Structure formats: structure tokens, C-alpha cells
Image (tube, rainbow, N blue to C red):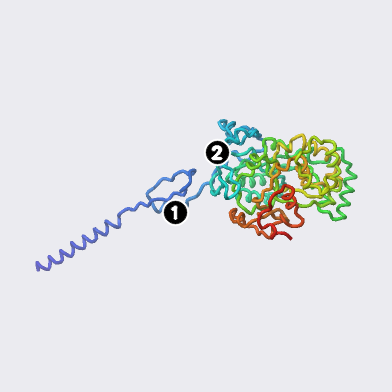
Amino acid sequence: MVAGNARYLRYIVIAVFTLAIFYFFSSARYDSVPIPSSLGRTDAAPKPNTGSSENIRSQPQVQQPIEKIDKIDKTDKIDPAIKTDKTGKVDKSKADTGTGTGTGTGSSLKKTAGNTPLGTTPDSPGWETDLVSVAPGPRMNATFVTLARNSDVWDIARSIRQIEDRFNRRYNYDWVFLNDKPFDDTFKTVTSSLCSGKTHYGEIGREHWSFPDFIDQDKAKKVREDMAERKIIYGDSVSYRHMCRFESGFFFRQPLMMNYEYYWRVEPSIELFCDIHYDPFRVMHEGGKKYSFVLSLYEYAETIKTLWDSTKKFIKNHPEHIAEDNSMKFLSDDGGETYNNCHFWSNFEVGSLSWLRSKAYTDFFESLDRDGGFFYERWGDAPVHSIAAGLLLNKSEIHFFNDIAYYHVPFTHCPTGEKTRTKLRCHCNPKDNFDWKGYSCTSRYFDVNKMDKPEGWEDQKD
């Protein structure tokens, strides 16, 4: 009996001991380590550890957007000698050191630039391989500029994404938008959210977007009607003529543009096919370039019948403006007697605003403007800019950006050379490259400048 009771007692002790061990482990607390959503970020505030893994898992980790302070700016004018920080506050310590936007003189800027090599080819020092971080080196006093309507918002949004993804997200240059009507809130909200630099919005004054008082409007109307009958593209359009005249003689005089020394023109619905590993504005500044292009072609002769006559009159009246080492051979096959219609396609151009504001260029534009060809014919800004660059600049001041791959309906510039396209991570089809086709003037440009054509150009001819 005693032995039986002892056995039952042992069973009871073992059961109590087992229950105690089970209770100890089941009541132990496990504190999980939270993984912060701001891993790798410096702008997110740390979240407190509550000690509850359930609470941490049940609350979604939301990445807060980076706030852009004072992003939309309609009226501010930027002092080109002063650099502003991301909050819009003036950083005077950078005003004259060459590390800011620069003053246009280039003295301190070039000194700083010398410490950061400008690599424009894969084999040159300073070639950028890190296309994620903010680019090193100085920034030029430059801006993108776009003429657009409110209805263009989604087409220009596409262009901005192209520019930002391939280049500007690392450089943060400003963007100026111009319109002959006030921009609406949708346009401002969409574009400012996409641009990494500051955005500025300007309304064009009526004096720059209307018929000047010396134009016979009855005569101009008859011209439009005649061109419409002959189905000349934009032949009956009044707004297209205002646009061409504005781009030829007034965009660079707009108050917002007066803050800058260089511009890059961007139009709606363009595409960039390759990464841009360097700063084209810096190429222009350090290379002494004043005008650049990626596509060239022949103008539609019916739209510019008297443009060269007006040009010859200007040459006769202003021989002091004609550059000694000019590009007349690009523009004419007979020493200037006639125009061969070659021009740089101006929907892409990177250029010097100081040159466009110079007496030589403004004299040229005003001479053409008085002749009335923007309205009595249909002169485009592309041949106007091209003739001016060809006559008023030395050949060394015009630059061809082979490695900026570009599309604007219907033409494509795709860099010639497989090695170049691979290094630049291009996605354009080289068969679409317009450069060496029969209707392109780029081959002529290379010949006039005694430049070697890139390897493989023969394979892309017609």
C-alpha cells in the first residue's frame, strides 16, 4: 500500500514539473527587431520600438515623399551669380567660387571645372559610370526651355521623364516653361512634380505673339489661303507662324530667360535613347561652343522662297557681323549665291543665350523680321537659327552631339558605332538613324568641317 502511494506521488511530481517547464517556455516574451522602412535613407525619422512584433507587422511601412520646398516659381528672377540651395535660400558662399551656377564670365568656373575632368568618351578621364548619384563637378548657368500649351501637359510630361531619367536627375538644372496663355494648375502641378530643378512659368507678351504693325494682314491671309490649297504643311496656320517668329527672335528675351547663359530646348513627345554621361552645358562652356544640334536636313523650299534674298541683303549691309571662318559651304553650294536649304533641326538645340542676345544675331533677326517672311511666306525658326549660326559663328563654335540619341517625329538620331551605343546603354535601332540618309545634311557638316565620319556610317546610308 505504501509502495503504491509512493509511485502515485512520483507521477504527480513529474506531472507538476512538466507543467512548470511548459508554462515557463510558453510565457517567455520574444521581442522582434523592427526593420526600418528608411533603410538607406537619411530623410525618414526613426520609428520607436514598441516591443510588440504584432504591432510592427500590422502597420505598413510608408515611405514618405521628399518634400520639394518652393518648387513652383512663377515670378522669381535668379541672380546668375548666386547659387540657391534646395530650400530656395541663397547660399552666398557659392556666389563667386565657381561651385554655383556661374556668372557667365567663366573665370572661377573653369578653375573649379579643372578639378573635375570632363569625360565625354568612355576612354577619357572623368567618364561617369555612376549614373545614380548626384553628378560631381560644377553646374553651368543654364536651363531647359519649353514652349507649350496647357493641352500639351501629358506630351511634355513624357519629354521631361526622358530628360530626367537619362540626364537631369543627376544635375538638377532648372526648367522654364513659356506659353502665350496663362498656365493652368494641372500643367504646373504635373511638370513641377517631374522636374528635379526649379520650375518657372512665363506668359508671353502680346508684342511677341502677334502681327507686327508693318505686316499687311490681307496679303498674309492670301498667302495662307494659297498654301492651304497647295497642301503645304502648316501653310494656313497663324499660330505656327507666331511660334516660328517667337522662337527666332524672342524666346531668349523673355524675363525668365534673362537669368541664364545657356539653354536646352525641349519639345513635347521627344525621346532620348541613351544615357548621357556628362554635362552638355559644360561641353558648350568649356569648348567655347555657341550652338549645337543632333539632326540636320533640307528645308521645304516652298516655305522659304525669299529667305536667302533677305540673308544676302543682311550680309551686304552688315559685313562686320560675318565670321571669318564661317560655315557658308554648309549653307550654299555656289559660294553664297543660292541657299541649298540645309539647316539644323531646332527642336533640339543647346546654345548660348549670350550669342542670341548679341548685336550680330539681333541685327540679323530684325532685318529678316522687317522683310515679313514669317507671315508672307512661312519661314521656320530652324533655317533662321541655322543660317545665323552658319554665318555669324566660326565653324569651331558649332557642335554636333553624336552621343545624344534623340527622336522627334519623324526623324531619329541614333549614335553611329556599336561600341558607343553599348557604352551609352542605347535602345535605338541603328537602322533608324537619319544622319547618313540622302535627305540629311549631317554628312555635309562633317565634310565642311573636315571631320572623320564615325566607323560604320557607310552601312547606314540609303
Above or below 205: residue 151: below
Q: 386 or 162, which lies in front? A: 386
422 left or right, relative to 222: left
Please say whether residue 61 is visible from this viewpoint. Answer: yes
Above or below 164: residue 200: above
Look at discs 1 and 2 and give the one toward the viewer: 2
Task: Read off the residue under disc 1.
Answer: 58
Please say whether residue 307 is visible from this viewpoint. Answer: no
Q: Position of residue 274 (x, y in %)?
A: 62, 53
Q: How many marks?
A: 2
Q: Earlier in the sequence, mark 1 or mark 2?
A: 1
Image point (24%, 58%), residue name: 20
Give the quadrant of the N terminus: bottom left
- Residue reaching furthest left? 2
Task: Read off the residue under disc 2.
Answer: 115
Above or below 31: residue 107: above
Q: Amino acid at mark 1?
A: Ser
Q: Amino acid at mark 2?
A: Asn
Q: Position of residue 332 (x, y in %)?
A: 81, 47
